[in-house]
Image (cartoon, helix red, strand yellow):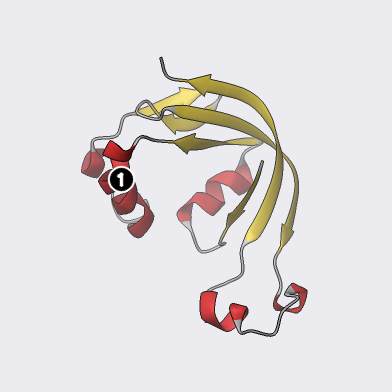
Amino acid sequence: LTCYIRPNRYTYDFVEKGECFTASFYGEEYRSALSFCGSHSGRDCDKAKETGLTPAEVDGCMAFEEAELVLVCRKLYSYDLQESGFLTDDGIPEKFFGTDPYHRAYISEIVGVYVKD
């Protein structure tokens, strides 16, 4: 699994420090909670308290009980995206990044798969 995280995101610190991370997938009924999580920083609020999601430890990593699918991923390699790496000249860096930092990519091995019954 490859994921991309901006260094200014709170999640970035957790992924950087740990050996593993989780990727979680939810049903449509959690769209509002996930929208809140995506637009508010865990530095400024308790996302679990605000959304009603239930934190759970899965193989030493953080996830939420409400997820329908949780992938536990072990980091193998990371690299930083750079403007010079874009292969088109149609303004993608300016359009999607502006003044925000470029993402760090994490290539990982899926070491656990948990599916809710």
Horizontal side, residue 13 vs residue 66: left or right: right
Indicate the quadrant where residue 28 lies: top left
Q: Which residue is at 55% across, 51% downward?
A: 13
Q: Quadrant of residue 103?
A: bottom right
Q: Residue at x 57, y 72 (%)?
A: 101
Q: Is residue 99 visible?
A: no
Which amino acid is tagged 1? Arg
Q: Position of residue 14 (x, y in %)?
A: 54, 45
* Circle 1 Cα neighbour tier, 10 Å, few/some/many (<14 / 14–19 / ≥20): few
In this rendering, would 94 be left or right of 48?
right
* Residue appearing at x 71%, y 72% in the figure: 82
Q: Is residue 74 visible?
A: yes
Locate the C terminus by quadrant.
Answer: top left
Q: Is residue 13 left or right of residue 83?
A: left
| Residue at mark 1 | 31
SS category of the residue bearing label 1:
helix
Q: Is residue 90 above or below residue 58?
A: below
Please give the name of the residue rendered at 42% of the width and 27% of the height, measured from the top-left corner.
68
Residue 43 falls in which quadrant of the image? bottom left
